[in-house]
Amino acid sequence: MAATVIDGKAFAAKVRGQVAEHVTRLKAEHDITPGLAVVLVGEDPASQVYVRSKGKMTVEVGMNSYEHRLEADTSEADLLALIGKLNSDPAVHGILVQLPLPKHLNEDLVINAIDPAKDVDGFHISNVGLLGTGQKSMVPCTPLGCLMMLRDHHGSISGMDAVVIGRSNIVGKPMAQLLLNDSATVTIAHSRTKNLADVVRRADIVVAAVGRPEMVPGDWIMEGATVIDVGINRIDAPEKGEGKTRLVGDCHFESCAARAGAITPVPGGVGPMTIACLLANTLTACCRANGLAEPE
Ligand code: NDP
């Protein structure tokens, strides 16, 4: 039986629509417009694309977008000074520093300088600790988007066996924490995991966040499992013409879809949900800052 392809693009459009409706109400009833500040240091081409599309979608849902583009050789002191300014600006409810930062800047120091209440990426050590102890926090956008798709598809994931491949601070670890908070039985796999294929074969839910094109083949997937493919990898596509490329995930889509019960495609799966969750987090931060009821 063919897998259900989870349409992250449509789901993300629905989430953005709900955010936009809430923003309209905030403006009409409280004269408040949520604001998201995005800080980009340097000219990494992929980061530039992400920042542009974040800015565009922020404006589309009716929020204010503040973009700060800094030179690649910006000093840590100057970057920290900008973050300090944004922390105390009441028009800014969310602050996102686009990663990766140039090598001379200490990412941990910079992220932990953001006011945790405005840390819409959920990477500040306070938010990591709150998530780890099951308290109200800002939840990292990509894992949050994955969880929303899983809840939408399954209703409850309580008691399910979940394997997260990847243990990064931005995807793998918070994903595992969210699955655990929803009462899944969670295994975190990584580059040192032995017999990865056998570990993955036990899973009702597989979340792949590795960054290796099509690394997970279909025969690792348990019949009927749900596959959430976080990977975004650009590979050569000579079939499209000379020098052409295409995006693939960390899972081999055709063979995994042949065994899975449900699967997210790349592109059009987790990616669009990430930005939708960023906007949802900004709205949440704005509501909290103003003592208003948070969106569901
Ligand atoms: P990182 O490079 O930070 O982490 C990759 C993880 O994969 C590490 O924990 C690493 O293990 C593990 N790994 C590497 N090789 C293997 C292997 N052979 N077997 C098992 N595990 C392995 O990546 P990110 O978490 O930042 O991103 C992962 C992927 O998700 C990337 O493709 C990225 O582009 C994508 N991504 C997509 C987003 C979206 O919006 N859809 C957002 C963020 C990321 P170890 O720790 O042992 O080195």
Image (cartoon, rainbow, N blue to C red):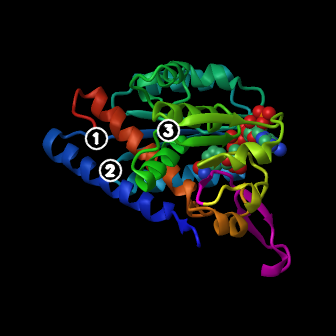
> Could you say where residue 64 lies in the image, as x and y percent from the top left?
37, 45
Q: Distance between the residues labelled 1 and 3?
A: 27 Å
Residue 244 in magenta stretch: yes
The residue indicated by pointer 1 is: 295
Mark 1 or mark 2, which has the lower sequence index?
2
Answer with left or right where residue 190 lies relative to residue 124: right
Residue at the image point whose x is 55% and y is 30% from the top: 177
Q: Residues within 10 Å of mark 3 (few under 14, many from 20)?
A: few
Q: How crowded is mark 2: few (under 14 residues within 10 Å), some or many (20 or more)?
A: many
81 and 211: which is toward the camera: 211
Q: Does the residue labelled 1 lie within 8 Å of ligand 1?
A: no
Highlighted magenta segment, given as a residue range: 224-249
In terms of image quadrants, where is residue 225?
A: bottom right
Is any part of residue 43 visible from this angle? Answer: no
* Residues at discs 1 and 2 in contact (Cβ within 8 Å): yes
Identified at 71% across, 62% down, the residue is 248
Residue denoted by label 3: 159
Residue at 61% x, 39% y: name it: 98
Please give the residue where the numbered disc 2 appears in the rendered image.
19
Amino acid on which disc 2 is placed: Val
